[in-house]
Image (cartoon, rainbow, N blue to C red):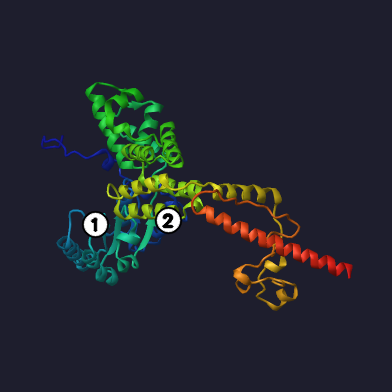
Amino acid sequence: MTSSGRAAPYVPLAERLRPRRLDEVVGQSHLLGPGQPLRLAFESGRPHSCILWGPPGVGKTTIARLMAQAFEAEFIALSAVLGGVKEIRDAVQRAEAARSGLQPRATLVFVDEVHRFNKAQQDAFLPHVESGLFTFVGATTENPSFEVNAALLSRATVYVLRPLEDGDLQTLIERALASGDDMPALDAAARRRLVAYADGDARRLLNTLEMLAVAARAQRRTQVDEDWLLATLGERLRRFDKGGEQFYDTISALHKSVRGSDPDAALYWLVRMLDGGVDPRYVARRLIRMASEDIGLADPRALRLALDAAEVYERLGSPEGELALAQAVLYLAVAPKSNAAYTAYQAARTLVAREGTRAVPLHLRNAPTALMKELGYARGYRYAHDEPDGFAAGERYFPDGMDEVRLYEPVPRGLELRIAERLAELRRRNAQARAQHQGRASDHQAG
């Protein structure tokens, strides 16, 4: 209650626990740790315009506020979802007033979801960033390479923020429980479940924790275990237990369905994962892996399509971008399968580990200096483009003294059928050329 007897305005737990000092920020040590870029920027005392790119709930707004505080600047926050040119003009007027007042102050203009502004709205900031009227800080969950104008992007440093680690989220739970807000105690299993549900998002974690506290107080419960947590939040915790058995079982089912050429089952498991709250970017990365591991050169278009699907998702986000992932899953499932590239790569790793570091043969080395030419570098190298059919038949490319090894064996499916035919012809020509060379060498010795 306030002194007037009225109820104090409600402030969410996430806002109450927002860091007031840089040392209170949890996570982002790659930017805020000692000697790291943003830490150095804070310590320099000289603000600069920047774009903070990262998923929700990782501290973008907090860092912007702390910047303004560190540089003793007027803080003006705009939302690109709700604002427009009028709000930009108002911010410019406030910045001019701050600079020309009796006690001149710098201004930091923070634009949340800056990718929502169109080109004209983003361009409206340019002259004022150029003139130094204010420091511009934009926050975005989308790739700024696609969503922020090149002109504005060239005037701002991009900092990539990462999802919070599990240990960071556990730290936030401890802070919330110690905040004096009548929070219930949580057992270890309940904490793990909350951390998994938050999936790197501090705001989601604290909002869920606050909801739990309200429910616990209503039931006069002082201790929360995982069973009660699941019963209370129900549908909300249908999300994946990131790093847990369910998560890995389901991605395994998706991968095996694609490998087994069952598009219907693959699409089912994809939707199960997306419906469960998995980060679609993770799915995109796994699809790229499947394209290389299980399809490879049987259909090289599969890898390109998987990469395109990942890029489409980065541009569109959810839910529109998820359709591109579904398209990629269907294509990968029906594509001809080959693990020949994957098998060859693993065999090459084993070979290198066994053979150690062998010297590069002299004829395969570059010879940019006269001394290197005198030492025999590049001597005897046959430039394939000058040979018949662009192939130096009989040439050796493995280290001297090492037997040639066949690592890549195409499968009789898809494009690898033709690759196998081509390889067989090249190997036949190699064998023929080497046999002729050995014959000439024998004749020379006999003569």
How many residues crowd mark 1 within 10 Å: few (<14), some (14–19), many (20+)?
many
Q: CA distance from mark 1 to mark 2?
A: 28 Å
The N terminus sits in image quarter: top left
Front-lying residue, 204 or 148: 148
Q: Is residue 134 left or right of residue 338?
A: left
The residue lying furthest to the right in this view is 447
x, y (%) of residue 138? 29, 58
Q: Which residue is mark 1?
A: 116
Q: In this orientation, which residue lies closer to the viewer: 333 or 140?
A: 333
| Extreme residue toward the bottom, this view | 370
Residue 127 disc label:
none
> How far from the left and from the top, in percent, is residue 444?
85, 69
Res 304 label: 2
User: SS at mark 1?
Assistant: helix
> With 93 as the anchor, is 249 left or right in this view?
right
The reply to whether callout 1 and callout 2 are in contact (CB within 8 Å) is no
Q: Quadrant of residue 304?
A: bottom left
1 vs 2, front mark:
2
Kindly identify the amino acid type of the residue bearing the numbered disc 2: Arg
Residue displayed at 37% across by 35% down: 240
**Which residue is at 68% across, 52% downward?**
405
Camera sees residue 263? yes
Tell me which label, 1 or 2, sits earlier in the chain.
Answer: 1
Q: Quadrant of residue 164?
A: top left
The answer to whether residue 23 of the structure is visible from this angle is no
237 versus 305 height, above or below: above
Determine the image quadrant of residue 104: bottom left
